[in-house]
């Protein structure tokens, strides 16, 4: 890609699946003049440098952001407050700060209060991923034809929002701007509850007797295999997601529990008609996902 990069200096704080995929995509599409990677662990930083994911790398978050036009926080959400406090005095005027966390309203409670008035906060969430993590997991095509949701506060600089939008679009994503609280309600249904169910089902399997557990693994059908893939996701990240979005998750979990009770009652009573109606109704959701090219 020719022409000037969208951002001269980009800093990635954290270099797991999303951070490394962003590095690949930004370099592929010429979106950053230079990419700095900052991590807490030396071995992670060494691997990022070895993979060519950055122009330079550092363990010093303050030094990492001092020249950055764009700072992307790619860490578990539990670290946001400490990161914000550490980098805030060193952010230059006009810098844009964004993130890739799966819960958005808490960003305004943890990260936002730490940042100075002369920077622009544009929270983001790429709805994309795999069960793999770490700097080796990333690939440039991760975001292609996937949604990235931005949740800037009212009054956020329009140019900053547009630049972050353009970044994601050039990485192949579809972008939508929405209210942070609404985002968290939607994702509680589409992402957080399915992960909680997957962790629970696979956890149940691990508590079975050894012989039965071996047969569960040996004869796993596609549905169970899908659950094991989801349940292999990064435990630190998902711990933080459930704790930061607890109200929305508990609300959806309550509704799910009510629906599950109805299905248990139908099975107990042998009510085939009710089961058939429920299963038929839910097939339309799957068709909608396929039609939206999100399968």
Image: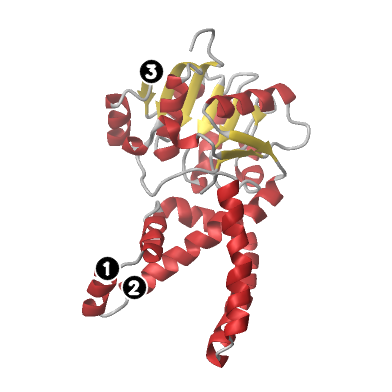
Marks 3 and 2, the one that precedes in the sequence: 3
Q: Is residue 202 above or below residue 96?
A: below
Circle 3 sits in a helix, a strand or a loop, which is it? loop
Q: Which mark is residue 205?
A: 2
Q: Is residue 184 above or below residue 112?
A: below
Marks 1 and 2, the one that precedes in the sequence: 2
Residue 164 visible from this viewpoint: yes
Q: How is the image coloured?
A: secondary structure
Q: Position of residue 158 (x, y in %)?
A: 74, 25
User: Which is nearer the eye, 239 or 65?
Assistant: 239
Q: Position of residue 286 (x, y in %)?
A: 56, 57
Quarter of the image where one finds residue 213: bottom left
User: Which is nearer the eye, 124 or 142?
Assistant: 142
Q: CA distance from mark 3 to mark 2?
A: 45 Å
Residue ID for mark 3 = 55
Q: CA distance from mark 3 to mark 1?
A: 44 Å
Residue ID for mark 1 = 217
């Amino acid at each position: 890609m020719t022409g000037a990069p969208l951002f001269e200096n980009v800093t990635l704080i954290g270099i797991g699946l999303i951070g490394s995929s962003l590095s690949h995509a930004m370099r592929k599409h010429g979106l950053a003049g230079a990419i700095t990677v900052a991590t807490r662990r030396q071995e992670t930083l060494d691997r990022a440098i070895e993979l060519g994911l950055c122009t330079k790398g550092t363990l010093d978050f303050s030094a990492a952001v001092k020249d950055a036009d764009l700072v992307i926080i790619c860490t578990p959400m539990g670290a946001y407050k400490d990161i914000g406090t550490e980098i805030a005095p060193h952010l230059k005027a006009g810098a844009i700060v964004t993130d890739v966390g799966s819960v958005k309203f808490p960003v305004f409670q943890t990260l936002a209060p730490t940042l100075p008035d002369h920077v622009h906060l544009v929270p983001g969430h790429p709805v994309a991923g795999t069960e793999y993590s770490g700097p080796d997991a990333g690939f440039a095509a991760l975001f292609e034809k996937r949604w990235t949701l931005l949740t800037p506060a009212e009054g956020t600089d329009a140019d900053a929002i547009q630049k972050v939008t353009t970044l994601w679009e050039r990485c192949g994503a579809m972008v939508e701007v929405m209210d942070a609280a609404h985002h968290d309600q939607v994702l509680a249904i589409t992402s957080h509850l399915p992960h909680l169910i997957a962790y629970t089902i696979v956890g149940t399997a691990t508590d079975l007797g050894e012989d039965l557990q071996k047969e569960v693994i040996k004869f796993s059908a596609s549905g169970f295999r899908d659950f094991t893939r989801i349940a292999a996701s990064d435990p630190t990240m998902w711990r933080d997601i459930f704790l930061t979005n607890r109200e929305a998750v508990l609300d959806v979990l309550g509704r799910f529990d009510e629906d599950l009770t109805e299905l248990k009652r139908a099975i107990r009573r042998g009510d085939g008609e009710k089961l058939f109606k429920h299963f038929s109704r839910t097939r339309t959701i799957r068709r909608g996902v396929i039609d939206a090219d999100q399968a």
